[in-house]
Amino acid sequence: MSDPEVNVDTAWESSVCGESGDCCAWLFGKVKKDSHGHLYTNVIGGKEYAMQEMAKLLSRSRRGNVPFACKNVF
């Protein structure tokens, strides 16, 4: 869940692409392959997960057309 408080002052939405997860939909960044041929992007608690990138704001503003970059973070 990237935005549990949508439409609240702390939420962020871009006039360009919508919510933070929508802005980077289907972008996975650097994808790795395990010994069984399964793809993953992150290791959390020793387990491998394929996770799409999320929008990281490049400005402190949360209003209007805010610049962002897609990053693979969790």
Image (cartoon, grey):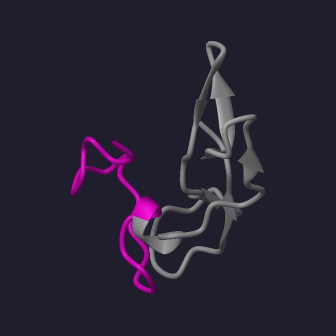
As rendered, which of 35 and 26 lies closer to the eye? Answer: 35
Q: Residue reaching furthest front?
A: 36
Decide: is 40 above or below 53.
above
The answer to which quarter of the image holds residue 4 is top left
**Residue 6, percent from left and from top:** 24, 53
Name the residue at 47% across, 70% down: 25
**Residue 73, percent from left and from top:** 65, 42
Going by the image, does 45 lie left or right of 21?
right
Quadrant placement of the N terminus = top left
Name the residue at 73% across, 37% down: 34
Decide: is 23 above or below 45.
below
**Residue 39, percent from left and from top:** 64, 48
The answer to which quarter of the image holds residue 53 is bottom right
Name the residue at 21% across, 57% down: 7
Q: Residue reaching furthest top?
A: 45
Point out the stretch of residues depicted in magenta.
Answer: 1-21
**Residue 38, percent from left and from top:** 62, 44
As rendered, which of 32 and 68 lies closer to the eye? Answer: 32
Q: Residue reaching furthest bottom?
A: 16
Going by the image, does 22 lie left or right of 71?
left
Decide: is 43 above or below 69.
above
Decide: is 21 above or below 64.
above
Disc tally is 0
Does 14 appear in magenta? yes
Quadrant placement of the C terminus = top right
Going by the image, does 32 lie left or right of 5?
right
Name the dominant secondary structure of the magenta segment. Answer: loop
As rendered, which of 23 and 15 lies closer to the eye? Answer: 23
Name the residue at 35% across, 52% down: 11
